[in-house]
Amino acid sequence: MNKLIRSKLIKWTYLLISVFVSTIFINCGSAVDTSNSENILKSVTHTEWSRNATIYEVNVRQFTKEGTFSAFADHLPELKAMGIDILWFMPIHPIGIKNRKGTLGSYYSVKDYKAVNPEFGSLDDFKNVVNKAHQLGMYVIIDWVANHTSWDNVWTQTNPEFFTKDDKGNFVSPFDWTDVIDLNYDNKELWDFMTDALKYWVQECDIDGYRCDVAAMVPLDFWKFAKPRIDAVKPVFMLAEAHEPELHEVFDMTYNWQLKDLFVGIAESQKNGDDLHKYFLDEKITYPADSYRMVFTTNHDENSWQGTDAERFGDFAEAFAVITGLVKGMPLVYSGMEGGLDKRLLFFEKDPIVWKESKYRNIYTKLFWLKHENKALWNGTAGADMVKINANDPFIFSFTRERDGNKIFALFNLSRHQKNIPVDDQNIAGTFTNLFSGETVTLSPEQNFNLEPYGYVVYYK
């Protein structure tokens, strides 16, 4: 069966299963207790250092005026101070010239899997970034494009049989991605070559893992083949650019596109806080218990093609950013977000981030400090479930998470109106610290909260 058709069939199958399960769950009522339910899918064993980790997407080209590894390395201490643990570098490989888009081309049009893009510097420059990150207690993963290559990838000359071809023997682009050509995983020799390239960067540069582009378009059996062979060199962290639950057999983390889409829906007045609560209940029975989901408001695709957070979310943007630091999942920060990124970065051209003072750096710093220190917020089964606090208002998103004496209580007004919110719930009683003001407060089981439009409070102990 053609690889692209097979990929689409798999995606539709899992989508239908997810919708079916969700429908059953919602129809049974929100009072259903799933705390002891066990998903039949199992999750990969995670590295211990990932248990309370955060992640940062590095756009080397746009991060500095120079657009180099060396220039980026100077900013590592400030990222460490913000609470970043994992640095995900967008593809660092040479970019194809044939059928290139724009002046500089797409990072995802890889010409050589075992080389460095000279635009960014040398192999030694990259090794230096990895070494400095490790010295600071940070980890490095690189973007890996296993589904397709540039038209002039070195394999087109040495191993043309690795590629999908039409009935005339011509290379084929997946979808309308005209600057790349499709790899054919029916050829098992490709599996060995691709795995060898994956092992190379772990051996040569001591990186800590991979973010795998369009991971669901590559056969799951390939990932099952490659992962233990990479782990034999060094146990690695794997992030899939995909949402399919079955990928957690191999990958530590998948994209939580569903949450991002709900943020869009709320900003467009089509969804509300109740929809968020329903989603997290559904996620609990759809995904393995110890799976990590990457939660985000933006990334390179969203920013360049869909718009800035301000464009897509308006006045909700700040509340959504805070939510990503508190719900189940690992929060992502994209390059420039801590500087209030307010423009769409060009994808195929040089377009440096304009850095400025922003409230978001302080917001992320406080959230990530809390995530590191408060076990309720840790990833997977190391953290706590979200327990809904009933505020009897569909526009209020409120929950607690509690583990080993650590607790957080968060309350969000996801409306355009000021709200007086009466809460009657024993679960909020106790003495807390306000995360953003530092104020100590004692809450009773019956408590009123006044929140401005788009407002929120976060308490912890």
Image (spheres, rainbow, N blue to C red):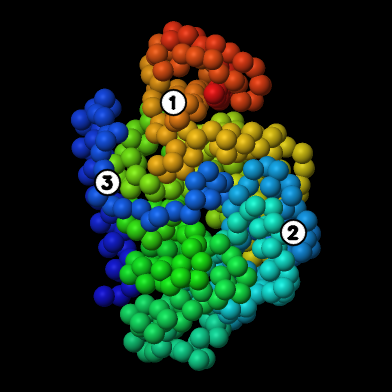
Contact between marks 1 and 2 (CB within 8 A): the answer is: no
Alpha-carbon neighbours of circle 3 within 10 Å: few (<14), some, or many (≥20)?
some
Contact between marks 1 and 3 (CB within 8 A): the answer is: no
Mark 2, secondary structure of its residue: helix
Mark 3, secondary structure of its residue: loop
Q: Which mark is residue 37?
A: none
Alpha-carbon neighbours of circle 1 within 10 Å: few (<14), some, or many (≥20)?
many
Alpha-carbon neighbours of circle 2 within 10 Å: few (<14), some, or many (≥20)?
some
Q: Quadrant of the C terminus?
A: top right
Q: Quadrant of the N terminus?
A: bottom left
- The kind of residue tagged 2 is Ala
Residue 208 showing in the rendered view: yes
Using the numbered discs, state the Cα–Cα distance from disc 3 to disc 2 in whole angstroms.
42 Å
Q: Which mark lies nearer to you, 1 or 3?
A: 3
Return the disc, 1 or 3, that comes first in the chain's sequence: 3
Residue under numbered circle 1: 399
- The kind of residue tagged 1 is Phe
Using the numbered discs, state the Cα–Cα distance from disc 1 to disc 2 in whole angstroms.
38 Å
Residue under numbered circle 2: 73
Q: Is residue 282 left or right of residue 458?
A: left
Residue 414 image position (x, y, % from top left): 49, 26
Question: Closer to the camera, 247 or 453?
Answer: 247
- The kind of residue tagged 3 is Asn
Q: Does 277 sit above or below residue 345? A: above
Using the numbered discs, state the Cα–Cα distance from disc 1 to disc 3 in whole angstroms.
23 Å
Residue under numbered circle 3: 39
- What residue appears at the point 56 percent right and 70 percent down from the top-left corner? 202
Residue 172 image position (x, y, % from top left): 43, 79
Q: Does 269 sit above or below residue 337? A: above
Residue 371 image position (x, y, % from top left): 55, 37
Contact between marks 3 and 2 (CB within 8 A): the answer is: no
- What residue appears at the point 39 percent right and 48 percent down from the top-left corner? 291
